[in-house]
Amino acid sequence: MEFLDLPPSTAARGTVRLPGSKSISNRVLLLAALAKGTTIVRALLDSDDTRVMLDALRALGVGVARVSDSDDYEITGGGGAFPVKQAELFLGNAGTAFRSLTAACALSGGEYVLKGVARMHERPIGDLVDALRKLGARIDYLGEEGFPPLKIHPAEIAGDTTEVRGNVSSQFLTGLLMALPLRQRNTTIEVVGELISKPYIGITLAMLRRFGVDIARNGWQGFGVPAAARYRSPGEIWVEGDASSASYFLAAGAIGGGPVRVQGVGRDSVQGDVRFADALAKMGAQIDMGPNWIEASAPRSGRLMAIDIDCNAIPDAAMTLAVAALFADGVTTLRNIASWRVKETDRIAAMATELRKVGATVEEGADFIRITPPQSLIPNAVIDTYDDHRMAMCLSLVALGGVPVRINDPACVNKTFPTYFKIFSTIAQ
């Protein structure tokens, strides 16, 4: 489908069962592949990004079997480096797969080529490659320096300390942390500058512990991987619901009256994006939360309030705040979002462009966006999505302002949430 026309809505209410977390799904798949033993992965996200990872692991010799027609998978790990020592991997635009597999392949003793779609080849990876080279990895750029595609050769023995910049993408540090147990040497990672998206590193560390590896941490500036670290299967692991995906429905409840409840993620989540609910509460939304659910309703006053907020900890969910700002009294400023510019698209520029189409006044900077809502939304806006799943899902919320909106290329949501628009239609009224 080239476009999807969303009818005008003025209310939102209902209950949504969330799909599995993309961040957790792809971390668990890789760790299960590197672990000794067989792992049953329950409630795995079914999306383009996880299919890319599953296909790559099969090509690398990992045992992958779907459990009947469920979203459960049986992963038989090799207890270390990948069994197949020569492979070419196509990883689409899946950053979580590309960055982590770059690190794991670099330390697996083989010859590998890693490629993606055109946009993936525009997303920087030089910081990760430099960090791996300091540990003996041999990696060549097949195109522009600092960007995919990559050719990987067997690593050589080198130093045991490396460094990585923390302000470009937390996925670089995640890739290093997950791959370094393959070295079987005491290895130290030093983070240069501020580490962005710390909660995503928290997810990584939590998943490593589930697979038997404890990382020594010096604040957020230093990490130590012991030589004795070995991955062991936990036998069975459940994937939480996706907290980033929860943001769209929680915002819908706050905008459209609610209540809207999301199930599968809550107070006990390891995902930092559950803090999106706190940001909504600062805007005046009524928030209730249990161990495995969150519920949002509109403010008692009926209107959200603008906020000025540092979004370093919730970069993906912060996009939803940009659209919620259309329904808030005052000027909303989202700060510390420089990482938006190196995602599936330049999300700061894209968000500014699309919000202006519906009447907002938008100022954008290197690491911030400032949104002044219009007196009334412009109807029949045609929203471009830039092959970016989160642009499509965020901007669908415009319809809750009582205006029809057209979403171009709605299938881009297949990256993380193939059934998004079907589920959105059940709560928008």
Image (cartoon, helix red, strand yellow):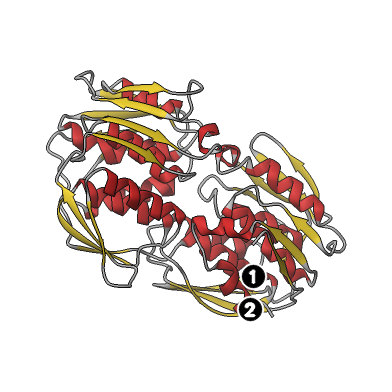
Q: Residues within 10 Å of mark 1 (few under 14, many from 20)?
A: many
- Quarter of the picture containing the N terminus is bottom right
* Residue type at the position of mark 2: Gly
Where residue 40 appears, as percent x and y from the top left, is 22, 63
Front in this rendered view, residue 410 or 87: 87
Where residue 188 appears, as percent x and y from the top left, is 26, 29
Q: Give the number of the disc on residue 26.
A: none
**Vertical comparison of 271 with 83: above or below:** below
Residue tagged 2: 258
User: What secondary structure is found at the residue carrying circle 2?
Assistant: strand
Please name the residue shown 45% across and 33% down the image: 166
* Residue 61, visible in the rendered structure: yes
Where residue 110 appears, as percent x and y from the top left, is 23, 30
Q: Marks 1 and 2: in contact by CB < 8 Å? A: yes
* Residue 219, visible in the rendered structure: no
Residue tagged 1: 252
